[in-house]
Image (spheres, rainbow, N blue to C red):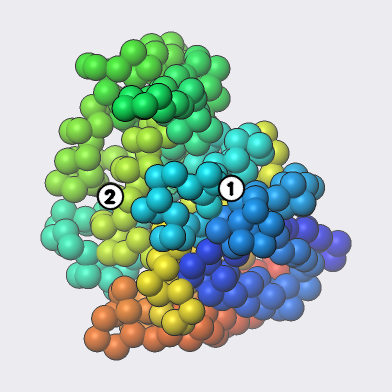
Amino acid sequence: MEGFHKHIVVLEGDGIGPEVMREAIKVMEMVNESLGLQVTYSKGLIGATAIDATGDPLPQSTLDQCEAADAILLGAIGDPKYDNNPDAPVRPEDGLLNLRKSLGLYANIRPIKIFEGVQHLSVLKEHVIQGVDFVIYRELTGGIYFNDKWTKGDVAADTCLYSVEEIKRIAKLAFEAARGRHRKLTLVDKANVLETSRLWRKTVDAMKADYPDVLVDYMFIDNAAMQVIVNPARFDVILTSNMFGDILSDEASVISGSLGLLPSASMGHSSRLYEPVHGSYPQAAGKDIANPFAMILSLAMMYRAFQLTAVSDAIVDAVNSCLKKGVATEDIFRDAPCKCSEAGDAVCFELQDKLTQSGTIPASLGSEK
Ligand code: IPM
Ligand code: MN
């Protein structure tokens, strides 16, 4: 496609980050070549890797690069050497949290879907997960993650604070998403106990009038944690705070069979960030066994935001074809797994076919869904 040029920043991060990223880049380069697109990238340091190299989990140069980019791809963050050290002066996670905050990425979008061919691998019964298709809108730059924190001797505190403004801006995105889906929005909170949750309810309630076509319901987080397992098909769009969204999205990953399949997108004021929901899985680092599909599906979310809907769909299709053919890493097909790099190759192979099929892609390249 003539003249299409985007520049992105690639942050491999820690653990399996570099391995899953390598596969996503393979896919990206194949798309570039097949369609004559120019998606160029430069790499930046973040997380434990950045601490080792510079002492800072988010060096200024990384932040500068990210601010100038059209999008950011991130692998994973975290290193066990910090996990059991409560006194560590800096942590890898600070890099990611600062990046989200600095870029104003206040909405984290985590779709939960069933992948054909692997339903039977879910720990949940097939009839329970039948038809599951929902998306979590997690607030990402406020709440208990980001407000006043302190330790004084034997006492410590994390403050959960939200303003109407913070709630409104993500609620707006969630309402709009519901409009494009099954028009159902569930606010998950703990309004029977928390002041902040009551403010969320009031704010969302006041916005309902602007979205008369969207059905809003409210659910306490403890109940929601149960409903995600016993009746996940009831959800369409879940809107929730930072902490609840963090927990709920890991929990919801069991529906699709593996955390290794879940992509996410974060958006806000400027460039968007795409990252798998899974962590750095340090035990697997360097072994070529990690699942690259969540990273590749995150890349697909990036193409969608670039309005290259057909490319995005083709990548998702390619991953689905792999799963249907039984090609996936050991978290999915324990008995006959492929390697991380083979899974990436397989996606490229499937994709090649889809990109060249009867010219469908170039013709509809720029079309919105
Ligand atoms: C996530 C992760 C992060 C979070 C960590 C790595 C700080 O668990 O993206 O869900 O808690 O937000
Ligand atoms: Mn998490």
Please state if 259 lies on the left or on the right of 37 as rendered: left
Q: Quadrant of residue 244?
A: top left
SS assignment at label 1:
helix
Q: Residue placed at 17% from the left, 41% from the top?
A: 226
Q: Is label 2's Cβ within 8 Å of ligand 2?
A: no
Please state if 107 lies on the left or on the right of 188 as rendered: right
Estimate how packed mark 2 is, as few (under 14), some (14 to 19) or many (20 or more) residues with alpha carbons within 10 Å: some
Q: Amino acid at mark 1?
A: Gly
Q: Is residue 342 above or below residue 198?
A: below
Q: Amino acid at mark 2?
A: Glu
Residue that extends furthest to the right in the rendered view of this protein: 3
Q: What residue sits right under mark 1 in the picture?
A: 95
Q: Is residue 321 above or below residue 96?
A: below
Q: What residue sits right under mark 2 in the picture?
A: 251
CA separation in Å, label 2 and label 1 = 24 Å
Please state if 305 lies on the left or on the right of 66 as rendered: left
Q: Is residue 315 above or below residue 234?
A: below
Q: Where is residue 216 drawn, in percent x and y? A: 33, 24
Res 65 label:
none
